[in-house]
Image (cartoon, helix red, strand yellow):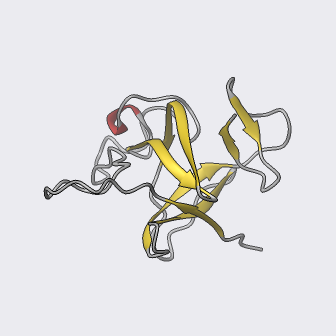
Amino acid sequence: MRRAIVLVVLLASCGDDKPPMPTPEAGTPSAEAGKGAATGEPCKGGSECEGRVCLTDVVYAGQPIRFTDGYCTRKCPGAIECVAGESCVEFRDAAGSLVSSYCLKTCTTPSCRTGYICTAAGLCMPR
C-alpha cells in the first residue's frame, strides 16, 4: 500500500526572481546518479548524494524544520517510485500547491542517523 505524506515547503518572499526556499540542490540525473550518499545521509549539496538532491529546510505541519547537516534524497515525480526503504513525500507551498515530491528514508526505531528520530509516520526526520 502506498502512503501519501505531505510536507509544506517554506517559501521566501523576496522581490527577485530567485527560486522558492528551500532550494534543494537538485540536478538532472546523469551518469553520476547512483554514486554518492544514500537517502537520509548528511550532505552539503546534491552532488554528494546518490539521488542528486540535498534538502536543508522545510515546513512540516506549519512548523519549520531544519534537516541538520543536510538530507540526501531523490525526486519521485509522477509514476517513479522510491526504492525499498524510502517513501515518496509531497512537498507543498503555504497555499497547498504541490512543489515537488522527494523520497525520504523510512524507519523503525532506532534506525535513523544521529540527530534524527523515527516519526509515527515511519520517516527519519530531524529531532
Quadrant that contains the C terminus:
top right
| Residue 1 at x, y percent in the picture | 77, 74
Q: Nearer the viewer, residue 9 or 3?
A: 9
Q: Specify whether 42 is left or right of 84.
A: left
Residue 46 placement: quadrant: top left
Q: Nearer the viewer, residue 124 or 94?
A: 94
In the displayed structure, 10 sits above or below 72; it is below
Q: Specify whether 91 is left or right of 108.
A: left
Number of numbered discs overlaid on the protein picture? 0
Q: Which of 106 and 126 is in front in this view?
A: 126
Residue that lies at the very extreme toward the top in this rendered image: 114
Residue that lies at the very extreme toward the left in this rendered image: 16
| Residue 83 at x, y percent in the picture | 61, 55
Residue drawn at point x = 22 percent, y = 54 percent? 14
Q: Specify whether 49 is left or right of 118.
A: left
| Residue 24 at x, y percent in the picture | 37, 46
Q: Specify whether 10 is left or right of 31.
A: right
| Residue 113 at x, y percent in the picture | 68, 28
Residue drawn at point x = 66 percent, y = 42 percent? 125
